[in-house]
Image (cartoon, rainbow, N blue to C red):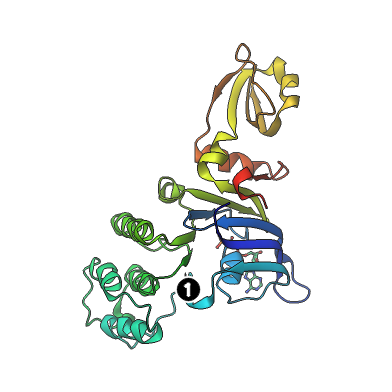
Amino acid sequence: MTDTVIEAEGLGLRYGRKGAWALRDCTFRLPEGRICALVGPNGAGKSSLLAIAAGLVPPTEGTLRTAPREELAYVGQDKPLYPQLTVEETLRLGRELNPGRWDPATAERIADAGGLSRKARIRTLSGGQRTRVALALALGKRPALLLLDEPMADLDPLARHQLMGALMADAAEHGTSVVMSSHILTELEGACDHLLLADGGRIRLSGPIDEVNAAHRLLTGPAAASGELARHTVVESRTTGRTLTALVRPGGPVDSRTWQTSTPSLEELLLAHLRSPDAPTFEAAEVRA
Ligand SMILES: Nc1ncnc2c1ncn2[C@@H]1O[C@H](COP(=O)(O)OP(=O)(O)OP(=O)(O)O)[C@@H](O)[C@H]1O
């Protein structure tokens, strides 16, 4: 089994003693070196999970084991930078705070690619420019695990594309594990190789994207044959006139005389799960404990 960079067991979090559970019964494993997409609707618990992994919030119940703090970098939604410092001073601070780890070339490459003046004060930067400086600081730390909470939300499409490319190249070169939450599926598809779907505080899909995809099929066939679906795990099924379309996890061979089958796109797969909150969870064989 590959080494594990995050292992959560029965993880739960509630804010305040009487608050609702933001996370509940989360058990999953993330193998080292993956680029993991953490997706889910608003309020699913993505930020809460990342905050626990970053050591910012203790879980209310259960455990999460991960890399030691000095090997973690976290970029949250509110990028806490010192407004009065310049870009250059901020990077210098990064070096001072991470003795023995700091990689100035990487940090400067990420910051400079945005055309930022190193003399510019943080308070004069736009939201997207601050994001770039925060990512430069995070990558300059040479982390074993990079935790990113909606990192690209305030970047323009060109900057997003460029920064995502730089991030992926850097992670591949150094074998960095990355967990990245986002609502922009196109940003994740192609860039990520591992998936965690959070929904209602639970993890509903977990595993390598290839394996998650391969476990699902989209079936189209006559509505009258709906009884045949009983042998499969049905995530979602919809009937339009006499035609039935279903997203299933096949429990055996699918009869090709009755059903047209195709592999769902990542988006189809995620949307079908989100529309069907009661569909059984899926954990790829590779990440089962
Ligand atoms: N500081 C807080 N105090 C109280 N409740 C909170 C706090 N932060 C989050 N919550 C609650 O915890 C739940 C999970 O929130 P969280 O921010 O982790 O979700 P999310 O998946 O990151 O959402 P989004 O996509 O909107 O950023 C929500 O119901 C939210 O209202």
Residue 54, x across and y down, in percent = 55, 72
> How crowded is the residue under tag 1: few (<14 C-alpha within 10 Å), some, or many (20+)?
some
Q: Residue at the spot x=57%, y=43% of the render? A: 270
143 to 3, vertically: above or below: below
Residue 156, image x, y percentages: 32, 59
Q: Where is residue 170, by image quadrant?
A: bottom left
Q: Quadrant of residue 228?
A: top right
Pick the front one: 141 or 286: 286
What percent of the width, then of the height, locates residue 155? 35, 62
Which one is nearer the viewer's eye here, 240 or 280?
A: 280
> Left or right: 42 with respect to 80?
right
Residue at image x 23%, y 70%?
112
Q: Quadrant of ligand 1?
A: bottom right
Residue at image position (60%, 15%) is 256
**Circle 1 — which element?**
helix
Outermost residue, top side: 257
Is residue 251 placed above or below 1 in the rendered structure? above
Q: How many marks?
A: 1
On the question of residue 284 being in view, the answer is no
Tell me which residue sits at (69%, 32%) in the image: 234
Disc 1 marks which residue? 71
Q: Is residue 218 visible?
A: yes
Q: Where 240 falls versus 284 (above or below)?
A: above
- Type of the residue with mark 1: Glu
**Residue in front for this viewpoint, 271 or 248:** 248
- Is 268 positioned to the left or the right of 249 in the image? left
Asked whether mark 1 lies closer than 8 Å to ligand 1, one says no
